[in-house]
Amino acid sequence: MKNFSVSIVIPNWNGVYLMEKHFKKTIEASNGAEVIVADDVSSDGSVEYLKKNFPDVIVVANKKRQGFAGNVNSGVSRATGDIVILLNTDVEPEKGYVDPLLEHFKDQSVFAVGCLEKSMEHGKTALRGRGVAHWKKGFYTHERGEVDKTDTAWVSGGSGAFRRSMWNELGGMDTLFNPFYWEDIDLSYRARKAGWKIVFEPKSVVGHYHESGVIKSKYTPRDVLRISYRNQFTFIWKNLSDPGIFLSHIIWTPIRLLQSLLRFDTIMISGYILAALRYPKIVMKRSKQSKLWKVSDRQL
């Protein structure tokens, strides 16, 4: 078996309180791998905390806010490993989680492998990490999948391993999705559309403490939903090439917007408008990435 070198990249934004809880165990489970923290202009002393307590960790300190995708990209750009493992600051990996991930990369067509997340939610533990998705009425719908299978529709940007050479060929995460959400679904979809494989590995286990994450502490639920809708439309317009599914999207979009209006719910409408304002940028990204397309949307 090939000996893969590994880099662990952890994006951070004002997450020193999370690193105080979880970072030591992350280091202990790293098996001596290169560890990089990409800091997105934190104001809570994150960089100082790392330099004082973990001097061997490489800190990439952005001078300007990048958002999640841009911050991850800045960290990966400093990585030297064949395989890059992405972990959020609210994730705590269990010992031995690395080797099961690396086993899959013996297959040269594998781009990414996802971890099993023990997600702490409302005092209970939910098993996550595998996603299922399909095109329905012109929209790409996704949801949690049962963790008893190894196929997955995407690999989480908060707990997954990625082949760095393929990552670079894809151009990394798309910053159009900043500040958060849909960037890992988009990256996985682009990889699959290029003919590469992504896999879910239940033997690679991490704890994920969503409720204490930075997003929920810094953004209102309405803000999060608006950004999610904007990025959903961005994803569709950037990736969808099947004429039939696209026609369905054209038909169903005004219907869904009207339904939102009748419910006096303007969040989806504002998300659509925000995406439409960026349409020229979306088209440019679409033109660039379409050169890698080999698999149809219906096959995916």
Image: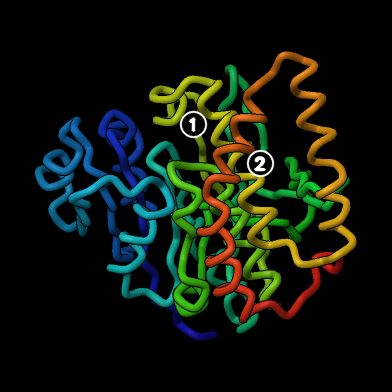
Tell which of 65 and 25 is nearer to you. 65
Outermost residue toward the top? 264
- Residue 181, image quadrant: top right
**How far from the left and from the top, in percent, is residue 238?**
63, 60
Whether 25 is drawn above or below 58: the answer is above
- Mark 1 closeness class: few <14, some 14–19, many ≥20 residues within 10 Å: many
Left or right for 213, reference 152: left
Question: How many marks are shown on the rendered structure?
Answer: 2
Q: Which residue is mark 1?
A: 209
**Picture disc at residue 67:** none
**How far from the left and from the top, in percent, is residue 129?**
64, 47
Q: Amino acid at mark 2?
A: Arg
**How far from the left and from the top, in percent, is residue 229?**
63, 37
How far apart, in angstroms, are the residues tagged by discs 1 and 2?
12 Å
Tell which of 75 and 66 is nearer to you. 66
- The residue depicted at 46 percent of the width and 25 percent of the height is 216
The quarter of the image holding the C terminus is bottom right
Tell which of 222 and 58 is nearer to you. 222
- The residue depicted at 28 percent of the width and 68 percent of the height is 78
- Residue 1, image quadrant: bottom right
Left or right for 291, reference 58: right
Q: Amino acid at mark 1?
A: Tyr
Determine the secondary structure under disc 1.
Answer: loop
**How far from the left and from the top, in percent, is residue 91?**
45, 41
Disc on the earlier residue, 1 or 2: 2
Left or right for 159, reference 140: left
Left or right for 49, reference 197: left
- The residue depicted at 69 percent of the width and 53 percent of the height is 236
Q: Which residue is mark 2?
A: 128
Determine the secondary structure under disc 2.
Answer: strand
Instruction: Give the color scheme: rainbow, by chain, secondary structure or one colour.
Output: rainbow
- Mark 2 closeness class: few <14, some 14–19, many ≥20 residues within 10 Å: many
